[in-house]
Image: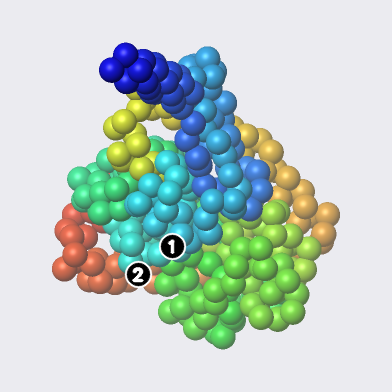
Amino acid sequence: MKGLKTIIATSLVLTGFVATEVEAATEWNVSLWGKRRAFTENVEKLAELVEAKTNGEFKLKLSYGGLSKARENLDGISFGAFEMAQFCSFYHTDKNPTITVTELPFSLDVSLARVGEIYMAVFNHPEVKKDLARWNATLLMPTPLPQYNIASKSDQLAKLEDFEGLRVRGPGGIMNVLSKLGAVKTSVPFSEVRQSMDSGVIDAASFAPHAHLATNTYKVANWVTTNLNLGSANCPVVVNTEALEMLKPAHREALLTSVDEALDFYVQNYEQNTTAKFDKAIEQEGVMQVTFTPEQTKQLNELAASVRQDWVKKYKGNFDSQALLEFTAEQFSQ
């Protein structure tokens, strides 16, 4: 009996030690892809802030492709394969239909900071929360991106009719407009965009500046657009809801109160470095810049309006798509 008591006591001590160790050193796995770039600076800054605020007791371990494929990050979040991830809604619109409202073309030139505010407002909409809850997911932070523009290896774009037959790699909102002009949405992996343009698999790619720089599309492009203004992609940072709820209150507060500062850093870094760097790069490469005329812009805007209504009709049986569209449009117009 004495021996049994000793074993039990030792077991309790060891169990208590392990539990203390786990609680004292909380580490979340974060699934990203590619490599560190302007697109991931919000997550990089968030990790830095959280570790500093908790004196190293809570850390975000960032993994660039080591945990999951980019298009499977939401699935990984749903069953707790990792605690945090970044994904793009156009990768799987059927999995997150509500947040695709932000990728619709609103034909407005909105500041990067304001894009972040709009996305956060949409993330907090009841319909969106309900949608993401299906994946045991909580939207934590947006990755605001500037308006996408197209870089193409094709002959110069002189009129909108020249989009006919153009094979373009791009997100849903933009491609839904361009498809009405005859463009063909063509999917290729992000890492293969430059090679695909060079070999003729695709004719063009629609990206924000950081992605054009990362893929080097401008180095093989004959022209780029300057004022397409048909929106960009929504690539949020999401967390596993159960993992968030299980965090120590101090750790959860450190995480949530670091979001705004991480976003501010991201926006400043993007505007001062990435956008300016891309502008300089296309100038040095001698890439033709295509600016749409007021008449062409008007036509694009009319197509954009029809795309928004197409979206409402597509999802009206799943959720109140009209109300969500009106809410989002109001955010963009403020």
At 55% from the left and 77% from the top, the residue drawn is 186
Q: Quadrant of the N terminus?
A: top left
Specify the quadrant of the image occupied by residue 201: bottom right
Check disc 2 and report its element: helix, strand or loop.
helix
Q: Earlier in the sequence, mark 1 or mark 2?
A: 1
At 35% from the left and 17% from the top, the residue drawn is 3
The amino acid sitting under disc 1 is: Phe
Between 226 and 266, the residue placed more toward the observer is 266
Q: Is residue 267 visible?
A: no
Residue 240 x %, y %: 36, 43
Between 270 and 292, the residue placed more toward the observer is 270
Check disc 1 and report its element: helix, strand or loop.
helix
Q: Viewed as shown, does residue 121 lie left or right of 74? A: left
The amino acid sitting under disc 2 is: Val
Label 2 sits on residue: 307
Residue 106 x %, y %: 39, 57
Between 274 and 248, the residue placed more toward the observer is 248
Q: Viewed as shown, does residue 291 lie left or right of 285? A: left
Residue 41 x %, y %: 59, 37
Q: Quadrant of the C terminus?
A: top left
Label 1 sits on residue: 90
At 32% from the left and 20% from the top, the residue drawn is 4
Residue 50 drawn above or below residue 192? above
Q: How is the image coloured?
A: rainbow
Q: CA distance from mark 1 to mark 2?
A: 15 Å
Between 86 and 307, the residue placed more toward the observer is 86
Specify the quadrant of the image occupied by residue 265: top right
Mark seen at residue 10: none
